[in-house]
Every structure is written in structure tokens, then in C-alpha cells.
Amino acid sequence: MMGFENHTSGNDFILLGLFSSSQISLVFFSFICIIFVMTVAENTVMILLIHRDLRLHTPMYFLLSHLSFMDILHISNIVPKMVADFLSGNRTISFAGCGFQIFLSITLLGGECLLLAAMSYDRYVAICHPLRYPILMNEHVSILMASGSWLVGKINSTVHTAYALHFPFCGSRAIDHFFCEVPAMLKLSCVDTSHYERGVYVSGVIFLVIPFSMVFASYVKVLFTVLQMKSSEARKQSFSTCSFHMIVVMMYYGPFIFTYIRPKSYHIPGQDKFLAIFYTILTPTLNPIIYSFRNKDVLAAVKSMLESNFLPNR
């Protein structure tokens, strides 16, 4: 670590990262690269499908397109820097670069929490109140939900980024993480950050606990409605869809809540890095699969796109 510190300027930070020079790390590094390519490809295809296929011009898929765009930005904010650091051996990041990572990360994390709650509301209305769906979830409402998620996420991120970077950092500037994340950076500060930590806790309740409670309540209502369906096939399909949705939602919210709700003194670097993998790398990969590619409309759109591109004479 001292070797890194001797090659940094006064304002630079050091990201200790996930990898060392061991052979096991090389395998894990390759896995992360594959995940990154898969995530960008899956979510890009999802956005293109929604844009070009009229069957997917509905509030649900409009929200999904924003989720896909957020996931592309989020994983691109973190993994390319990890790859560059591993290949070059230089793990420094500038003060401005760290600030940008924090800002974009919190914007997308907060925005996605709100967007997932909006998507769960969409599913609740579609299954529990299908006759009122055109009124409760129309194009205007979906645009408000998507734009609101982005706007509120940016406002929250601006406040947290400004606060997190204004603290003095004394001694080592080595962040024991694979990206600049607020809880990891607070451990480097040489002043009392308890007042700000209370603000992080309040923000965590607003952006994590409340939206997760809304998502959970929505899917509970959906499951009760599904269980009352007369068709066993419809029951089975709806139950399967809801179950997969809840699994990926818990993979996202669970580690995120555990990381941001705890006081600074309870944070363990190895544990924080492991938990962050779920909401920064794994869930962006799973989201298009769980929410989209298991859907008949999306599969039909994929088939239509392949036929139009590769079988033009048919």
C-alpha cells in the first residue's frame, strides 16, 4: 500500500480493489469482464427492442428501458476503472474522478430504488386493477415516474457528494474498496462524521426502506390476487414471475440497505465489497433477464427483429 501512496499526488485516492496479482484473481477478473460485456449487451438490446417494437410501447416497458439505461451507466461507472487498474497496476483515482464516481453511483442507486418501486406499482395495478390500468398507469404517469426517479436521485446525490468530499482526509488515502463509495470513504476521515452518518441513515430510510416496503407490499397483494385466479396455468405463470422479481429485488435492496443503514464503526471492508458486488454488478446483469427476456412479448420482439435483420426476403 505504501508503494501506491508514494506515487500519488496530495489529492489522489487509492482504490485497493478486489484483485491482487494471484492466479485466482485473474480468473475472477475474467469473470467480471464477461459479466460487464453481458450486462451492456443485454440492456442495450432491451432498449433497442423497446424503442423499435410497437408492442413494447407500454408504461411497463418504458420504465424497463430507463432501468436498462441506469444499469448500463452504473456498471460502466465502476467496472472499466477496475479493469484499467488491474491491467496497469496503477490504482490511483483523482479527487475529481472519485467525486464523479460517487455522484453517478448515488444518482443511479437512488434513482433505481425509486424506479423499482414504480415498476412494482405498475405490476400491482396491471394484475390487481386491470380495468383501471389505462387511467392509473398511462403514458403521462410513467413519464412522471421515470423523470422523478432521475431528478430525485440527482438531488440526493448532489447533497451526499458535496458532504462526503468536504471532510478532511488524514494519513492514508487508500480506500479499501473497488470504487469510491461513501461508507468506505468516511473511514478515512480524521474528523467526527456522526452527524453526517445520521443524514445517510435518514436518506437510506427514504430511498431504501420505504421503496422496498412498497415493492414488498405490492408483490404480496399481487400474490394474493394470483392465488385467487381460476386458471392454474395463469396462477403458475404469475407466481413464477413474481417470485423471480422478488428474488432480484431482494438481491438489490438487501445488501444496499445493510451497507448504508449501519454506522461507520460496524463496516468491515471485505464484507462491504462483497455486498456491493450484488447491487453494482450482479443485479444489472440479472434485471433484463428477469424482467424482460422471460416475457412472451419481448421474445416475440426479439424474433421479429432477428427475422427482419437476417431474413429480409421472408
Image (cartoon, grey):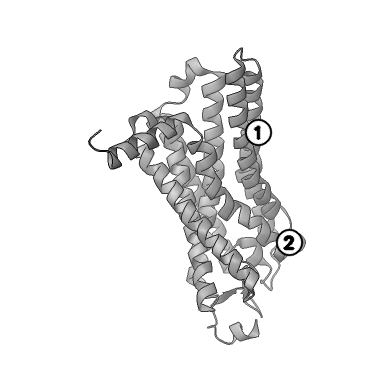
Which residue does the image show at 45% across and 37% down from the upper left?
63
In this view, 79 is above or below 189 = above
Residue beneath label 1, please? Answer: 216
**Residue 276 location in percent, x, y?**
63, 57
**Residue 92 location in percent, x, y?**
54, 76
Between disc 1 and disc 2, whose residue precedes? Answer: 1
In this view, 156 is above or below 133 = below
Helix, strand or loop under label 1: helix
For the C terminus, give its image quadrant: top left
**Residue 140 location in percent, x, y?**
39, 30
The amino acid on which the numbered mark 1 sits, given as a three-letter code, is: Phe
The amino acid on which the numbered mark 2 sits, given as a three-letter code, is: His
Residue beneath label 2, please? Answer: 267
In this view, 124 is above or below 5 = above
Which residue does the image show at 63% across and 73% down from the upper left?
23
Which residue does the image show at 69% across and 68% down from the upper left?
187
Q: Is residue 110 visible?
A: no
Helix, strand or loop under label 2: loop
Marks counted in the figure total 2
For the N terminus, give its image quadrant: bottom right
